[in-house]
């Protein structure tokens, strides 16, 4: 079976966190990653169409023990109840420019140094 998406998915297992409201942060797990978005697993339902502050702990492709906390904003595109947790499709944006090369390395985007 082939994936005809314009942004191919990478199956991952990264720690994440979502800020539901000021002072209310919940743990989550990133399951799929692309340059366009992520699929996130969380015990709390996230409101479709709402934008949240999110953190992804992204490992280095060269050394998995080196992890970078990428803080961004993410808008919920869909929710699916899966067992006792929810899977949410999130379009992320507004991350620090210094994290672009790390994210591209996971997305299979050719990385060039200029």
Image (tube, rainbow, N blue to C red):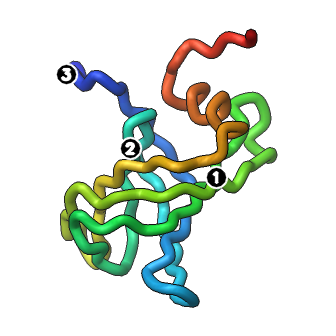
Q: Residue at x 24, y 55 (%)?
A: 77
Residue 70 is tagged as 1
Q: CA distance from mark 2 to mark 3?
A: 21 Å
Q: Which residue is mark 2?
A: 37
Q: Residue at x 50, y 79 (%)?
A: 26
Residue 109: where, in percent of width, then height? Answer: 52, 19
N-term-proximal mark, 1 vs 3: 3
Q: CA distance from mark 2 to mark 1?
A: 13 Å
Element under disc 1: strand
N-term-proximal mark, 2 vs 3: 3
Q: Are marks 2 and 3 in contact (CB under 8 Å)?
A: no
Q: CA distance from mark 1 to mark 3?
A: 32 Å
Residue 106: where, in percent of width, then height? Answer: 56, 31
Task: Give the image quarter of residue 64.
Answer: top right
**34 in relation to 39, above or below:** above
N-term-proximal mark, 2 vs 1: 2
Left or right side of 16 for 7: left
Element under disc 3: loop
Residue 99: where, in percent of width, then height? Answer: 67, 39
Residue 74: where, in percent of width, then height? Answer: 41, 57
Residue 91 is tagged as none
Q: Which residue is mark 3?
A: 1
Quarter in which the C terminus is drawn:
top right
**59 in relation to 78, above or below:** above
Circle 3 Cα neighbour tier, 10 Å, few/some/many (<14 / 14–19 / ≥20):
few
Quarter in which the N terminus is drawn:
top left
Element under disc 2: loop
Left or right side of 59 for 79: left
Circle 1 Cα neighbour tier, 10 Å, few/some/many (<14 / 14–19 / ≥20):
some
């Amino acid at each position: 079976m082939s994936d005809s998406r314009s942004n191919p998915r990478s199956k991952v297992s990264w720690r994440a966190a979502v800020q539901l409201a000021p002072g209310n942060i919940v743990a989550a797990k990133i399951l799929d990653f692309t340059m366009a978005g992520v699929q996130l697993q969380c015990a709390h339902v996230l409101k479709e169409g709402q934008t949240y502050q999110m953190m992804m702990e992204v490992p280095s492709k060269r050394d998995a023990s080196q992890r970078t906390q990428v803080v961004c904003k993410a808008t919920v595109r869909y929710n699916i109840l899966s067992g006792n947790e929810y899977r949410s499709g999130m379009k992320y944006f507004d991350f620090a420019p210094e994290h672009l090369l790390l994210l591209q390395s996971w997305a299979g985007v050719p990385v060039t140094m200029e």
